[in-house]
Image (cartoon, coloured by chain):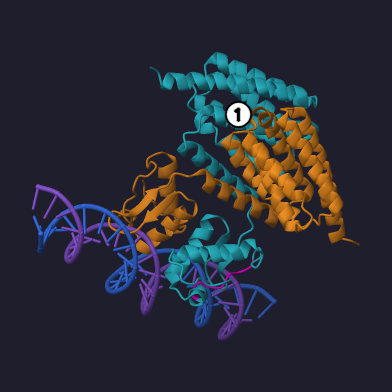
Chain colours: A cyan, B orange, C blue, D purple
Amino acid sequence: MKIDPDNKADLSAQIAEAIRDAIVSGQLIVDERLPSEAELADHFAVSRPTVREALKRLAAQSLIRTQRGAFGGAFVNRLSYPEAYGQQITTATLLLSMNAISFDVACEARYALERACTPLAALRRTPDTLATMRAEIHRQGQPGLTDESFCASDVAFHRALVDSAGNPVLSYQLAGAVEAMQPLMNMITFTARSREAIVGFHTRIADALSSSDAEAAQTALTELEAYTLTLGRDVMAARAPK
Amino acid sequence: MKIDPDNKADLSAQIAEAIRDAIVSGQLIVDERLPSEAELADHFAVSRPTVREALKRLAAQSLIRTQRGAFGGAFVNRLSYPEAYGQQITTATLLLSMNAISFDVACEARYALERACTPLAALRRTPDTLATMRAEIHRQGQPGLTDESFCASDVAFHRALVDSAGNPVLSYQLAGAVEAMQPLMNMITFTARSREAIVGFHTRIADALSSSDAEAAQTALTELEAYTLTLGRDVMAARAPK
DNA sequence: TACATTTAAATGTCTGACAATTTAAACGCA
DNA sequence: TGCGTTTAAATTGTCAGACATTTAAATGTA
């Protein structure tokens, strides 16, 4: 873990980077304990608050975890799937909300990625994931549902679809794409008719996966994409009239 | 921006969360200046170092940037694509390296995602992205190339393929999938024969995109996936003999 | 042995100070 | 007045030292 010469950037950022490099390069392995804050301060010739700021940076990225008490300290953290999901989702959500991404572009990306899952999902869907999809479809048909709950159920349905592919890396990658769309979808007011149409598409997708018909599932997804696009465009048109 | 009651978790983590919530919920908008550290310390009734640790957590996630001097301070940062790419890549790389993901699973996810891009790429590929792909193919044919350089060029080729789809959100999502594979691919020793085979697949893909033949591109990608899989399996078999 | 107590090591937090940096305002000068 | 220079103020970056809190090992005791 090397030192920092006469770089004039923030010391805490430099130190964080040095430790991060040590982790990604394998010099520090999972569950290994880092030197104590005092030792790190000594090693880098800085004060303890500066070291602490560096460690907090790493903690924010789930690269380390800290434990108080004797024989506590900072440990290299095994990045778990849930943590990775979470980071993926917040990053994707922020990227979309802060960069004026058009509904069309986000929608296209999302459905393209979901279509990538259907061949695998048709092969590997389990009774479990199918049941989840059916349950969400049923919920989406309930009359009293708010738009937000409908959206949340929509997300749950699509996550089940993605998980059906039985590939955790794929699930991780798509978590951001699916979840980050929710704020955009939440702007849509779902009429009884549009809900009915969406439930219809969902049913077709679930049926196709049940019978392992990847092609039918893709077709239904593509039609759902086109339909979602028209809904989104209506909202955008209503938002920016004139 | 609300306070924290009698939660006994780290104060800096709680404060970071409070500010993050304010950002994602839109209470704080892009380029808006946060209160000074002293004011935040006062507001949350903690000391300045504690506030600073919270701010460093947010800075590590590119949620804020800081500026020194009078009228400096912490500002809500617009998450740019390059930053998002970077986070995506480091997270995906760590997830793969720390969780004993099998080569097969990672490979499957990557090619499934890339296949999702081909229909769009066939429609929208530009002379620019095609030229990049051709250039990388040419480089991959050079004799003196090290295995690492070959890998890097392979990544560049696939990124060009993804970028051909002309959808920045899709490019962002796939950055992790493509780049995170590189450490795994780097374990492979590419013989002259395997390089020739890979260049052949790449050429077929580029040709297919040139002539807007999405189906041919998908077929070539699928065959490349199968071929990569055999290479990876050979390495894994050699690694864990007995 | 089993349980309670002590102790030591580490992180979490606070206080107060100074350094470095940057901008706006004040000032001086033609 | 107009413009360049200086000064002052605000803010983050860093440091030193201290105390509080937590945790597990070591120790003592019945």
Q: Position of residue B125 (x, y in %)?
A: 65, 32
Disc 1 residue type?
Glu
Q: Residues within 10 Å of mark 1 (few under 14, many from 20)?
A: some
Instruction: Please state the total of marks drawn on the protein image.
Output: 1
Magenta segment, prevailing SS (helix, strand or loop): loop
Residue occupied by mark 1: A108
Tell me: residue A130, above or below residue A195. Answer: below
The image quadrant of residue B218 is: top right
Q: Secondary structure at mark 1?
A: helix
In the image, is residue A37 part of the stretch drawn in magenta?
A: yes
Q: Nearer the viewer, residue C6 or B96?
A: B96
Along the viewing direction, whichever of B174 and A70 lies nearer the viewer: B174
Q: Is residue A4 left or right of residue A22?
A: left
Task: Decide: is B199 above or below B46.
Answer: above
Q: Which residues are magenta?
A: A32-38
Residue B28 on the magenta segment: no
